[in-house]
Image (cartoon, helix red, strand yellow):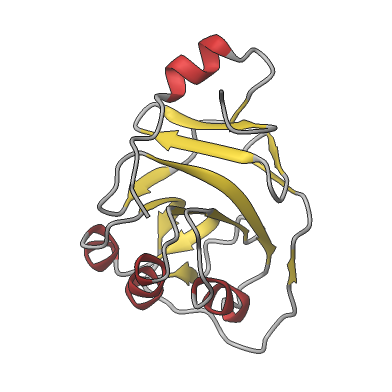
Amino acid sequence: MTEQAAPATTDLSDAHPEAQVCDPVFQAFGGRPAFSGPIATLKVFEDNALVREAVEQPGEGRVLVVDGGGSLRCALFGGNLAVLAAQHGWAGVVVNGAVRDADEIDAQPIGVRALATHPRRSVKGLHSGQAGLPVLFAGTVFREGEWLAADRDGVVVLPAPPA
């Protein structure tokens, strides 16, 4: 799979007034400062078992959007999962919650956006989660199959890839 440059969020926002633009709440992690792709969604709470299951599957250039309810009490994504995500072809991960192992994430060729870092891991089996549902955070609705682009200027969501 040939990697192509993600379009600039500023250009997308200018050219697509229908684009949703996330509130500026995310910190950037990962070795890829800009990334884009179709969205896959998860809704979880302080349990990253579904996150692991997702990144163990072929990413096919998609962006995993994880609604962790904004919890900052533990991390939902870390260095081991970043390695899996990169190996399986995920373009990036956006987490409404915390990550850990920031230096390890930065060493991987994926892009990651999250609210913060936290050293505590999640507890597996604590809560159930759901995949494929629309999720709402950062003033944006993320729907499975829609298209996300992220760079240093922000995160933009479009109904379909730009032409």
Q: Is residue 74 visible?
A: no
Q: Residue furthest bottom?
A: 125
Left or right, 54 with respect to 141, comes to left
Farthest residue to the front: give it: 1
Q: Name which residue lies at 67% across and 63% down.
A: 42
Q: Nearer the viewer, residue 50 or 163?
A: 163
How many numbered marks have been drawn onto this rendered protein structure? 0
Any part of residue 150 in sight: yes
Determine the residue positioned at 39% across, 44% down: 27
Against 123, residue 24 (above or below) is above
Q: In this view, does 53 lie to the left or right of 78?
A: right
Nearer the observer, 135 or 146? 146
The residue under the point 56% across, 23% down is 163
Quarter occupied by the N terminus: bottom left
80 up-or-down from 26: above or below: below
**Residue 2, percent from left and from top:** 34, 49
Relative image position of residue 115 (x, y in whole percent): 47, 50
Q: Which image quadrant is residue 5 in?
A: top left
Measuring 34% from the left and 55% from the top, which residue is drawn there? Answer: 110
> Is residue 132 depicted above or below 127 in this figure?
above
Q: Where is residue 61 in the image (x, y as percent from the top left)?
A: 47, 53
**Residue placed most toward the observer, 102 or 108:** 108
Give percent across and percent down for residue 150: 44, 37
